[in-house]
Image (spheres, helix red, strand yellow):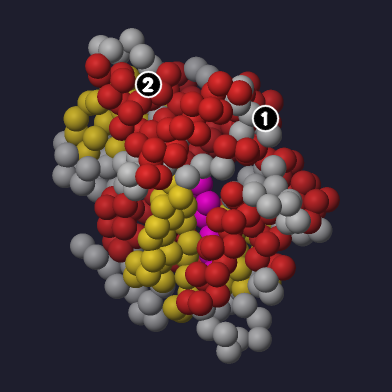
Amino acid sequence: MTNSQHLLLHQCPVCGSNQRRLLFPVHQSFVYSCQPCGLRYLDPCMSQKDMSDFYESPEQLFKSHAFYQTYYDYGDLTKPSKTMRDYQVFLSCLDEMSSSQKKTRTFFEVGYGNGLFLAAAQKKGWQVAGIDSSHRNRSVARHRFGLELQQGDFMSCQSSLTNGYDVVVAMDVLEHFYQPMAFLEKIYSYLSAEGFFLIAVPNDLSFLRLLSESLFRMSFGLIRGGIEKTYLMEHTVYYTRQTLSALLQKCGFIIKKQFFSSTDLERYHFTAIEKLAASGILNIGKLIHLENRLIMIGQKPSEKIIVL
């Protein structure tokens, strides 16, 4: 990746302030903390086109991060896994919140990966649809789960449902957008009145991040492995519970539920030593309630409320 592919922000992607504090260099960029709102973000960052190209090419993805080699092939409806347990928890929450009086309940996922979550939702009785930027993912979802889904740029598409979807899901997507409010406004337009939005992002206030940053600072920048695996070039914005909930409310959503989880390490390609170390760190994070994944469910009200 060359510097010509980098986009200079100069300001916070959420609040627009240029008052910020430089934290540390990482990869070919820098991590900043916005002074007014506390958001952390990379500047420079990848453009949206380069981001799409990066995820469209499995070769480029695996070359940049070897641990992704098994990520998009992982998961089976009949095989127990932490990922499937998380999906069942999410679906149970959405079942409880959504209206049971509807004959057809609609479910749309942005960035569906191999289609596992949509297949699990379909098995629960939801009518599912989705879009992903990768041709490969569309093919995998069709052959593995029999799902006929869209391939393309979500920001350029229009909803096929006049009244919107009952549920829209975006798992590990928002952190890629340097204009997150535009993305959330698009999500909002896809939802029916009083529809629900489920979002999952890396938790920036996790034990994993705190440990990585502490080791970096205590070693005067010599121990970089942790922060370079925590702050990835393709992840532009890093959210905590406070910054994510403030952003969702600013875009008109009502926060209905928020909880934490941790990464399913079986989805990734690690050496035995790497997996043992990662497992220990994630288990400590769980014990002290600083897990590395943040999940929220927001609701679109019947009339939009803007938080200034």
Question: Which percent across, then down, holds residue 137?
Answer: 71, 45
Q: Out of 62 and 223, give the one closest to the viewer.
A: 223
Write the start and end of the magenta stretch as one range.
167-173
Question: Which percent across, then down, holds residue 189?
Answer: 48, 67
Image point 61% across, 23% down: which residue? 272
- Asked which secondary structure carries label 2, the reply is strand
Image point 71% across, 60% down: which residue? 119
**Compared to 184, does 94 lie above or below?**
below
Question: Which percent across, then down, holds residue 193?
Answer: 46, 79
Q: Tell me the kind of residue under disc 2.
A: Val
Occupied quadrant, residue 34: top left
Q: Which mark is residue 26?
A: 2
Q: Tell me the kind of residue under disc 1.
A: Gln
Image point 50% across, 39% down: which residue? 48
Residue 179 in sight from this viewpoint: no
- Please rate how many residues cluster around mark 1, counting C-alpha atoms within 10 Å: few if below 14, some from 14 to 19, many from 20: some
Residue 105 in sight from this viewpoint: yes
Occupied quadrant, residue 284: top left
The secondary structure that dominates the magenta segment is strand
Image point 22% across, 26% down: which residue? 22
Q: Which mark is residue 69?
A: 1
Question: Which percent across, then down, holds residue 209?
Answer: 35, 33
